Image (cartoon, rainbow, N blue to C red):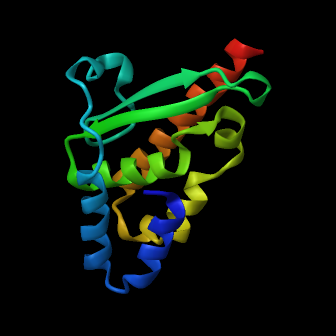
Amino acid sequence: MDIDEIIDNFAVLDDWDDRYRYVIELGRELEPLPEAARKDANKVQGCASQVWLSTSVKPNGAGGPILTFAGDSDAHIVRGLIAILFAFYSGKGARDILDHDAIALFNKLGLREHLTPQRSNGFKSMVERIKRDARSALAVTA
């Protein structure tokens, strides 16, 4: 599912209970994370839940590296947040990832005021990890 479709679906759902259910449903659609990827190096620090994020980098010539992500969490709502982040960032170039603000999207969707501060901080930690991986990918190809 792409990010525009997610934004459109959020706009149609007026009730926050429906939006929560939708976020959880998005998480259920995540590809399963291979057991081998559930290692400490892939754990996202700063999340109240357990969160794993695995990054694959492919060169794309002058366009710079392309990053794709796999991830999982032990919390249903967090799996949904991961799915939203992947729709926003996965399959994009490192420069695009650094140029686009998922925190602004998070706020636009109204997630910030409807999630606990711990969940919001965890979301920020996931975004920071993705951006760090994008910076690393650019540094390797520079």
Horizontal side of 91 relative to 95 (left or right) equals: left
Q: Quadrant of the C terminus?
A: top right
In the image, 92 versus 131, the foreground residue is 92
Q: Quadrant of residue 24?
A: bottom left
Which percent across, then down, holds residue 9? 42, 74
Residue at x-position 76% and y-position 30%: 63
Seen in the picture, residue 90 relative to 39 is either above or below; the reply is below
Residue at x-position 60% and y-position 60%: 104
Q: Quadrant of the N terminus?
A: bottom left
Horizontal side of 97 relative to 125 (left or right) equals: right
Numbered circles on residues, count = 0
- Pick out the residue farthest to the bottom: 14
In the image, 108 versus 3, the foreground residue is 3
Which percent across, then down, holds residue 79? 29, 48
- Pick out the residue farthest to the front: 61
Residue at x-position 49% and y-position 33%: 68
Which percent across, then down, holds residue 134? 62, 29
Residue at x-position 48% and y-position 67%: 5
Which percent across, then down, holds residue 97? 64, 41
In the image, 66 versus 39, the foreground residue is 66
Horizontal side of 2 relative to 134 (left or right) equals: left
Horizontal side of 74 relative to 16 (left or right) equals: left
